[in-house]
Amino acid sequence: MQTGAMSLSELGAAVRRLRERAEPPAGPRTGRRVRGLRREELAELAGVSADYVRRLEQGRRHPSAGVVTAIARALRISRADYERLCALAGYAATDGQVPREAGSAAIRLLERFGGTPAFLTDRAWNVVAVNGAWLALGGGAATGSGRDWNVAWRTFRDARGEISRTDEHQAGFRAALAARLRDTHLRYPADEGLAGLVDELRSTSRAFDALWRAPETVSAYENRAVFRTPDGEDVALDGSLLDVPGDDLMAVILTAAPSSPDAVRLAEVVRAARGPAVLRVGQAGPG
């Protein structure tokens, strides 16, 4: 299956990044202790020529599925990275299903944040677990929709009135959501639930469809939102996105500026709340 020039360029860049951070091959001490493989080393391990690797990294070669697998094995990359290479090369992922289970380590991550609102989502933006601080903000209310716990759906189709953003932050947040979802759709083309979500969003949200057809380049996830807490106070929080590679999940962490009035209000709201430290939720998210 052929793939576009842009995908080949992205594939080449991805291979180069993975090569440059790979563990050096085992062998006699040579004095070279930096991370990364030389092109010649990767070529030998993958059974191709060094010139082939060079052209691949330049976006001038479309590798076969077998070569992608050989390169992935030579680099000893994670399953998530392997699936992304397959998608960029135009091949379906092995099983095509978005992982949706949060392991014990991911749950402990939420517990560690304690007074900081945080939640876990899968790569399709389905929330799978939230911590008590997030619940204290009133972020767990349901509307009865089957997609209540999908962040993209709540953002583009059913935005929460308790959460507001400036036009600039809203545009950036939407671009980041759509970009991540588009990447997930490439990696998991056989996931019917994901395909249904994308089709529904494209057919019901002009803003989402525009971002899907002409995706923006998002170098970093940055988000500031104002939350109307259950006691009627406003709290401005900055969002950060962390990858949880072991479970192929994402963690959204919301923080207030240190020693600010927002930090004081957030602490008061969290202290007054009574609830579980972590709550596992359904696929249907806070926006």
Image (cartoon, rainbow, N blue to C red):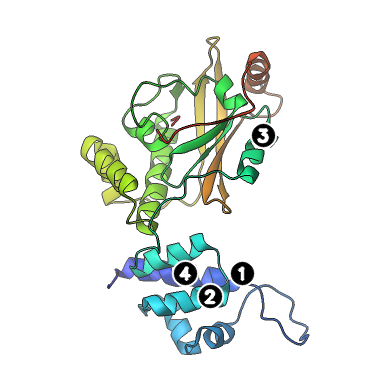
| Discs 2/4, front | 2
* Whether residue 191 is situated above or below residue 64 in the rendered picture: above
Which residue: 55% across, 23% down? Answer: 135
Q: Which mark is residue 111?
A: 3
Category of crowding for the residue at label 4, using alpha-carbon neighbours closer than 10 angstroms: few (below 14), some (14–19), many (at least 20): some
- Reading the image, the residue beneath label 4 is 13
Q: Secondary structure at mark 4?
A: helix
- The quarter of the rendered structure image containing the C terminus is top left
**Residue situated furthest top in the rendering:** 231
Residue 197 position in % (x across, y down): 31, 41
Check contact, mark 4 vs mark 3: CB within 8 A. Answer: no
Residue 88 position in % (x across, y down): 38, 66
Q: Secondary structure at mark 3?
A: helix
- Reading the image, the residue beneath label 1 is 21
Number of marks in picture: 4
Amino acid of disc 1: Arg
Locate residue 158 relative to residue 256 in the image: left or right: left
Q: What distance separates the C-alpha of mark 2 from that of mark 1?
A: 14 Å
Earlier-in-chain disc, 2 versus 4 = 4
Earlier-in-chain disc, 1 versus 3 = 1
Q: What distance separates the C-alpha of mark 4 from that of mark 1?
A: 13 Å
Locate residue 104 relative to residue 196 in the image: left or right: right
Q: What distance separates the C-alpha of mark 3 from that of mark 2?
A: 35 Å
Amino acid of disc 2: Arg
Residue 124 position in % (x across, y down): 41, 45
Check contact, mark 3 vs mark 2: CB within 8 A. Answer: no
Amino acid of disc 3: Glu
Amino acid of disc 4: Ala
Which residue: 34% across, 46% down? Answer: 194
Q: Secondary structure at mark 2?
A: helix
- Reading the image, the residue beneath label 2 is 73
